[in-house]
Image: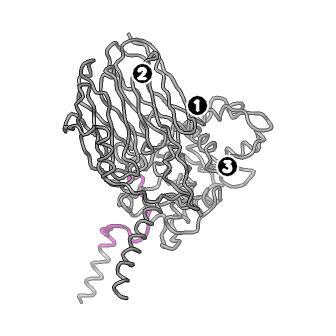
Amino acid sequence: MQRRDVPTRRKFLRLAGSTAAIGAFPMLISVREVEATPEMMTTAIRALTGGATVQTGKVKLDIPPLVENGNSVPMTVTVTSPMTSTDYVKSIHVFNEKNPQPNLGNFYLKPSAGRAQVATRVRLADSQKIVAIAKLSDGSLWSVTAEVVVTLAACTEEVI
Amino acid sequence: MKFATTILLAALLVAAGVVLRPLIATEIQTTERRSGYTFMGPETKAMQDDDTANPGMLGALDGEALWNRKAGAAGKACADCHGDARASMKGVAARYPAYDKPLGRPVNLEQRVNLCRARHQEADPFPYEKHDLLALTAFVAEQSRGMPIAPDASPELQPFVAKGRDFFMHRQGQLNLGCTNCHDDNWDKHLAGSPVTQAHPTGYPIYRLEWQSLGSLQRRLRNCINGMRAQNFDFGAPELVELELYLMSRARGMPMETPAVRP
Amino acid sequence: MAAALINVPKKAKNGDVIEIKTLMSHIMETGYRHTASGEVVPRDIITSFTCRFDGEEIFRADLFPATAANPFISFFTVASKSGKFDFEWIGDNGFSETASASITVE
């Protein structure tokens, strides 16, 4: 009897913890924890690369290491490239490991871009790894990884 | 003897103000006042500073369209009476909430818009916290951007300022907290990872990342009151307007930032 | 009420690398939120953004539920001749918005 109480108590605490997280969103709308795994990110990356070698380098990911609000995280990806008609960045793909979905964005460039740099704002559900992969005109793949810490807003909003 | 020495020491410390935070809530010194902007990270500040990256500006653009749109049985647009908002609305939001003689009490900017709609446009009021009212107040308040907050100092407003101040100061709710306990006494400390600001309404309506949309000062106040687990008020309640009035008085002189971005 | 904010320099010198900033009003409903009664709030997002210069594509982006509300996208291009930039946003439920901006290149 006593033994069975222990896992129940732990489960209750885990539920209470996630309820606190859910409480950060308006009560009219709640977010159910969707199963997202680092494996989903690996699968998505493999779908892009086709299993080809991805080298680290050339790509820079500018994302605040400590995020004020996961609803809107500014992100800039820059790829070192001369951006000439024979040597340019064809596309940039950004992935994450803990959102319900592995993609943060895909960006397609032409040599006329002049600079391979894209900025946008993304949603991050939790503290996690972000991976940016660039596909160059010669077919090579380059990547960079960043770790981001996401905190929640303190005073929550509830509909009475 | 030892006991007496301890008491004496404690009295001296209190007298010298060496105690880390005042034992009773005290208001922030004018020279120490800081906008919520200064508590944000560089990326969020950059979002506010760039008019083409600030999502609040999208609301202000919509507000401009509303300003020029004819409304109500009278078929008048705001522009028909007020002309170009850039001239006529300059400084207006900086002195709201303001006294409304017919009602005999202060009204905030949202209520002023709806009073105009009723009295001069013969139009239905905009519902609180819906896009139209947020956009229009964002547009009007944007015309005060950069100007110092200057609520009307007339004597008839003072009893209402005092009521707002009383609310701000007194402990209430399940947590027995007063606004002052965090925002006067513990600003720059952290609550669950977020910095506690001084609670100056310098940029309303704001684009709050948490809301992913524009929102009014009253929405923020209702959030806070919920967070304190205290009895809340409906939008437009006189208690909330009095609190707004007190907060603007407390922020007198600080520049308007509407539409601000906040986390 | 859809509104777009575009930042394109009005003038540039031939060969300048210029930054284009775009901001589009859109809720970007993820499709992962639920109402209090447990129903899914259906997905409603912008899925694609394209920029063309004098009709030719110069930049394109795929957007996802992970893109923040009121999507902000900035990118670069080389100013080579005077002309018109056309911006297009396409998304769920037939969402389609366009905007344009001209540039003078000397």
Query: Residue at position x 24%, y 89% from top?
Result: B1
Specify the quadrant of the image occupied by residue C105.
top left
Query: Residue at position x 60%, y 37% from top?
Result: C1
- Span colored in magenta: B13-32
Q: Is residue B17 magenta?
A: yes
Give the SS element for disc 3: loop
Quadrant location, the C terminus of chain C: top left
- Label 1 belongs to which residue? B86
State which chain disc 2 sits on: C
Q: How many marks?
A: 3
Q: Which mark is residue C57?
A: 2
Q: Is residue A113 magenta?
A: no
Residue A91, image x and y in percent?
Answer: 32, 31
Say left or right for C51 vs C43.
left
Do pointers 2 and 3 mark residues of a single chain? no
Residue B99, image x and y in percent?
Answer: 66, 50
